[in-house]
Every structure is written in structure tokens, then in C-alpha cells.
Image (tube, rainbow, N blue to C red):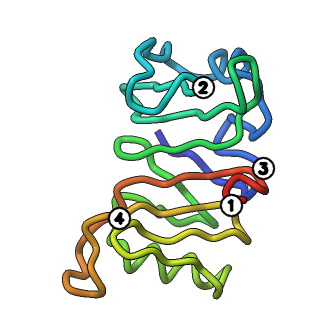
Amino acid sequence: MNFVIKPYESVGPIKLGMTKEGIRRVMPEEPEDDHYFRGPYTDHFVQMSFFAYYTGEDGVCEAIEFSDPSIAILEGKPINEVPFIEAKNWLEKFDPELKEERFEGVTSNKLGVGLYAPNYYDDEDPTIPVEAVIVFRKGYYD
């Protein structure tokens, strides 16, 4: 499934700030009940490889993370399951002040988007893909 990112607003039909119940209504599958991997304030939609992070048990969505088979589309272009360097260069067109963390990826506080590519090491292999994308609300990393 393709998810179009609207920075600091939404990912596909899911809006940042939606309730857990609202998100569960628009997703095509039920979330897994096991919260071992990401914590108790998270819904994991396994088949879509999609996580919704909430501010608390009955809180609102503050971030969305996803990977293959779900595809993140930003300004008309996929930014996951493509080479990290390609996705990073695309993000830099919109935010030249990306925060890069070695062995992690990049974060754009301007766009509210992060790319996770832990196997990418300073241009050693330009084919290393983005493994996951996170879209977050303002202040998420403060």
C-alpha cells in the first residue's frame, strides 16, 4: 500500500493527532496485541509493517513508522525501499539542514520525516536501501 506523506499532517488516511480508535477504523487489518517490540503505546499492523505511536494509553498519534511492503511517498517520489543516498538527496531538496546520524539515517525536522538505514556507511555501498520511514509531529524529538 502506498502512503502519501503530508509533512506534519498525515500519512495516507492517518492524521497525526488521531486517536487510536480512529486509526484502527481506517487500517485494513487489526493491530497485533503484543507490544514487546515497541512499547505499550504502540499499534503494530504486522502485514503492512506499520507502527502507530501514541502519546499514552488513550492518547493521540504522535508518529507513524513503516517499511516494506508499505511505501512512503513524499512529493510524488518513494522514499523507502530505494537506495538511502537517493532518498537522502531527495529530502535535502526540501530541507538542506538534515540531521544525519551515522549507522542510523537522517532526520528532517523541517518536514517531520526520518529515514532509517542502519547499514549505510558513508557512501561505501550506494545501493543500501532505506529500511524504514518515520513521520512525526512537531516536537517529537525535543
Q: What residue type is labelled 4?
A: Ala
Residue under label 1 = 112
Q: Give the SS element for disc 2.
A: loop
Picture residue at 39% right of the left edge, 66% below the top: 104
Disc number lying in front (4 or 3): 4
x and y percent of residue 57 in the render? 68, 18
- 73 on left or right of 25: left
Residues under labels 2 and 3: Cα distance?
A: 20 Å
> In the rendered image, which quarter contains the C terminus?
bottom right
Q: Earlier in the sequence, mark 1 or mark 4?
A: 1
Of marks 2 and 4, the one in the foreground:
2
Q: Distance between the residues labelled 4 and 3?
A: 24 Å
The residue singled out by tag 2 in the image is 41
Q: Which of marks 3 and 1 is nearer the N terminus?
A: 3
Precedes in sequence: disc 2 or disc 1: 2
| Above-or-below relation of 79 to 92 | above
Residues at circles 1 and 4 in contact by the CB criterion of under 8 Å: no
State how far apart marks 2 and 1 are (Cα).
Answer: 20 Å
Circle 3 is placed at which residue position? 9
**Residues packed near mark 4 inside 10 Å, few (<14), some (14 to 19) or many (20 plus):** many
**Residue 117 in the image: above or below residue 87:** above
Report the mark closest to the observer, 2 or 3: 2
Q: Describe the element under mark 1 as helix, strand or loop.
A: loop
The amino acid on which the numbered mark 1 sits, given as a three-letter code, is: Gly
In the rendered structure, which amino acid carries the disc numbered 3? Glu
- Side of 122 relative to 125 (left or right): right
Q: Which of the two residues, 121 or 69, is positioned nearer the viewer here?
A: 121
Residue 28: percent from the left, percent from the top? 52, 19
The residue that disc 4 covers is 117
